[in-house]
Amino acid sequence: MAQINEIKLRIKGIKDTKQITKAMKLISAAKLKKARKQLDHALPFFEKVRATMVDILMHSGEIENKFFDLRDEKEGKKKAYIVITGDKGLAGGYNHNMIKLVEEHLKGDHEALLFVAGNVGKYHFTKNKYNVYMEFDYPVQNPTIYRAREISELVLDLFAEGVFDEMYLAFTNMHSTISIEPKVIKLLPLELHELKMDMKITENPEERVDDVIVYDPSPQEVLDILVGKYVKGVIYGAFVEAFTSEQSARMTAMDSATTNADDILGKLSLSYNRARQSKITQEISEIVGGAEALK
């Protein structure tokens, strides 16, 4: 009897867990759809910003901008990273893969300044004595343009002040709902070559940019404004990509958990039926034995 009750309790517990995993999968699916739609609406604007920056740099002569300063004369350049992880777990290897990639990129450099978004990453890097910028406290859920603007203004100011010489952006990119990949890209300083590659501009730039545009008051001043918008766009895109990747990873993990729960329920139901059949057989045997003893 004790075994039957035990199995029944386990079945009830797993059914309750299954309901939770199914609900989490549906919630993640809704969030993923909303985030992708949000990014698709914003992408045309930021792509035009990139194209305009390339146009100015390629067709306006020599233009100097402090955010294009490679600082080649400096030795021992100070590095910084914006790292986007999740605020919680239950997303398969999403957080683990991101943290592992960043640590491989750091190569044991505990002096690099880390701007960590997401409680999981912040806890890990703080615990392991990395140089975490604790005033950087931004959630990763439901990314917005306004949040990206605040972050871009912060990092651009710190770069201009010389707090760091290079900044990298670490986030997870979603190729499809079943394929996500953590990656690290260089954010600052900006490089014309990288911008051209990003825009897929080859030796014939006229196909993608217009060299007859007149910039007012001047290409220099327009470029100064566009740099901030460009960095904001890259950061916003990374946050949305990371958010959608997290939801995709959670969907996959919860779907797998639901499938495993069904498998375990099938095995427990079989065990329960066997235990119940054994109990019935035992009771029949006891009744038959009692009847024989009364003869």
Image: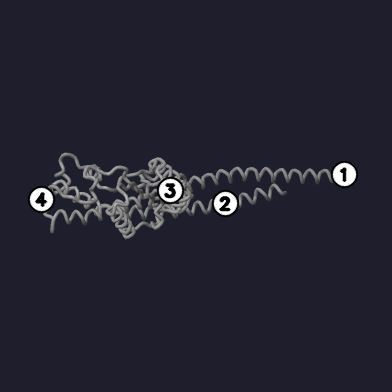
**Quarter holding residue 184:** top left
> Is there a contact, CB below 8 Å, between mark 1 and mark 2?
no
Q: Which amino acid is tagged 3?
A: Tyr
Q: Total label count?
A: 4
Q: Nearer the viewer, mark 4 or mark 1?
A: 4
Pinpoint residue 244: horizontal percent, then vertical percent.
38, 50
For marks 1 and 3, the one nearer the N-term is 3
Between 19 and 235, which is closer to the camera in this rendering? 235
Q: Which amino acid is tagged 2?
A: Lys
Q: Which amino acid is tagged 4?
A: Val
Q: Nearer the viewer, mark 4 or mark 3?
A: 3
Please, what secondary structure does the residue beneath circle 2 have? helix
Is residue 31 left or right of 225 when viewed as pictured? right
Q: Residues within 10 Å of mark 3 (few under 14, many from 20)?
A: some
* Residue named by callout 2: 15
**Which residue is located at x 39 percent, y 48 percent?**
245
Pinpoint residue 285: horizontal percent, then vertical percent.
79, 43
* Residue named by callout 4: 212
Please, what secondary structure does the residue beneath circle 3 have? loop
* Residue named by callout 1: 293
Identify the disc placed on residue 218. Answer: none
* Residue named by callout 3: 130
**Which residue is located at x 15 percent, y 46 percent?**
58
Q: Residue lying farthest top?
A: 203
User: How much space separates mark 4 and mark 1, taking CA atoms?
Assistant: 110 Å
> Is there a contact, CB below 8 Å, between mark 4 and mark 3?
no
For marks 1 and 2, the one nearer the N-term is 2
User: How much space separates mark 4 and mark 3, taking CA atoms?
Assistant: 49 Å
